[in-house]
Every structure is written in C-alpha cells, then in structure tokens.
C-alpha cells in the first residue's frame, strides 16, 4: 500500500515564506544601495581623495598623514579586513589636536590604492608596508596600531622589524592563536567567503561605488 505524504507543517510553511521575504528585502536593499551609490558618484563629479599617492615600486598606495612632526613617534594605523584610511579620519584629527602625527593608508586593492599581486596575505601586506614606510619619508621608530584582522599584519611586521617599533597597539585584534582555535574556524570560513565575494565586486568596480 502507498502511504500518503504527510501534510506540510504550517509552521514550516510560515518559516519558508519569512525566509523568502527576508531574502527579497535584502535584494531590494542591495539594489537600492548600488543604485544610490551610482547616483552619488554621478552627481558628485570628479573626486579628489585626501592624502597622497606613494609609489612602492610600480604600484601606488594612498597614504594619509596628519599632525605635526615632532620628537614623538609617528603612529602607523592598519585597518581591519575591508578597512580604509578613511576609517581613522576622526581619530587622526584628535591625535593631531594633541600634537601627535599619524599615518593611515589604503592597502593594495582597497580604496584608492592599486591592486597588488596574489596572494594578499599578511606577508604580502607587511612587505607593502615596509616599502610604503621607506618611501613615505616618515622617520621611526613608530607606534603600530592594528585593528581587527590587521592585528596579524602588524604583529608580523613588528617581529620582522623590531628596530622600527616604539610601541604596538592591538585594537580588538585577531591573533594567530585565535585563528588556530577550532571555535573560530566557522567564522574564518565565512570571512573567507565574503572576501572572495568582495574580490569579485572589486573587479566590477562596485567597491568604489560603495
């Protein structure tokens, strides 16, 4: 005999409809975000980013330094995973008001900086930072500050260049020890997936629209 299919659970049906509504809402918000960004870019005209562009050997990185030169160490700021120099604009202003000089930059392929060769891991980022500091004209030793995922970059750089380090600040920073923790693997896989998606978005020019 044939057993008839069990009727669908009303609760499961409502949950499915809710997920569809959420997905549709997110799609509409994404389309509005991209459309709004395109409109703003079109209306704003030519945009000149703050700071300057520094040649690190056939590639330019955007560098933004604020504050007076003094005998105090310059503070180099490394943004988190998808961060830019602009993330530190307010902080740099407040440091300048206290007479402290700071420098922040757009990593290769982010913001207004030229892309760099793959892979874009901490070793590549630290190598770019070494070239940027050498070409910037700023004199050390420095205080290095790394936010979030950048904690790994500045720790690597500081370990390779101890003579340049006057201090190290880790701000809500990710560490290699955390990356080895089993509980962090799910989160890191999500970060990896988002990074791949944003890499595709970057090739389409959507990150500049954002």
Image: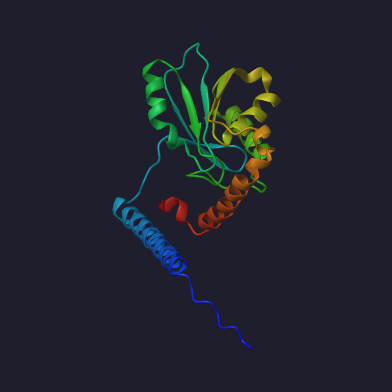
Please name the residue shown 47% across and 66% down the image.
Answer: 12
Q: Quadrant of the N terminus?
A: bottom right
Residue 146 falls left or right of residue 89: right
Q: Residue furthest bottom?
A: 1
- Give x and y (percent) for residue 54: 53, 36
70 vs 162, nearest the viewer: 162
At which x and y percent is residue 161? 68, 23
Q: Viewer-proximal residue, 149 or 62?
A: 149
Q: Is residue 70 above or below residue 102?
A: above
Residue 11 visible? The answer is yes
Q: Is residue 131 visible?
A: no
| Quadrant housing residue 168 | top right
Query: In the figure, 207 relative to 5: above or below?
Result: above
Q: How is the image coloured?
A: rainbow
Residue 36: x %, y % from top left: 33, 56
Question: Which of the pair 88/59 is nearer the observer?
Answer: 88
Question: Most extreme residue toward the front, as rendered?
Answer: 1
Residue placed at 32% from the left, 51% from the top? 45
Q: Which residue in the rendered view is the most extreme toward the top?
A: 71
Image-quadrant location for residue 173 = top right
Name the side, left or right, on which 32 lies relative to 181: left
Q: In the depicted view, which residue is nearer to us: 151 or 210?
A: 151
Q: Is residue 188 above or below residue 103?
A: below
């Amino acid at each position: 005999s044939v057993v008839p299919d069990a009727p669908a659970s009303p609760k499961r049906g409502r949950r499915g409809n809710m997920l569809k509504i959420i997905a549709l809402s997110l799609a509409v918000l994404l389309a509005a975000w991209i459309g709004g960004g395109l409109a703003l870019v079109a209306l704003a005209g030519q945009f000149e980013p703050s700071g300057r562009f520094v040649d690190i050997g056939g590639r330019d990185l955007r560098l933004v330094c604020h504050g007076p030169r003094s005998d105090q160490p310059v503070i180099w700021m490394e943004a988190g995973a998808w961060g830019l120099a602009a993330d530190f604009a307010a902080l740099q202003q407040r440091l300048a008001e206290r007479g402290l000089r700071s420098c922040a930059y757009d990593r290769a392929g982010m913001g207004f900086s030229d892309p760099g060769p793959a892979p874009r891991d901490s070793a590549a980022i630290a190598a770019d930072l070494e070239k940027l500091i050498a070409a910037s004209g700023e004199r050390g030793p420095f205080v290095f500050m790394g936010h979030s995922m950048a904690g790994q970059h500045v720790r690597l750089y500081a370990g390779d260049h101890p003579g340049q380090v006057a201090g190290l600040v880790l701000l809500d920073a990710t560490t290699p020890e955390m990356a080895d923790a089993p509980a962090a693997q799910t989160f890191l896989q999500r970060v990896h997936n988002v990074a791949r998606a944003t890499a595709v978005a970057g090739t389409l020019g959507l990150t500049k629209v954002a």
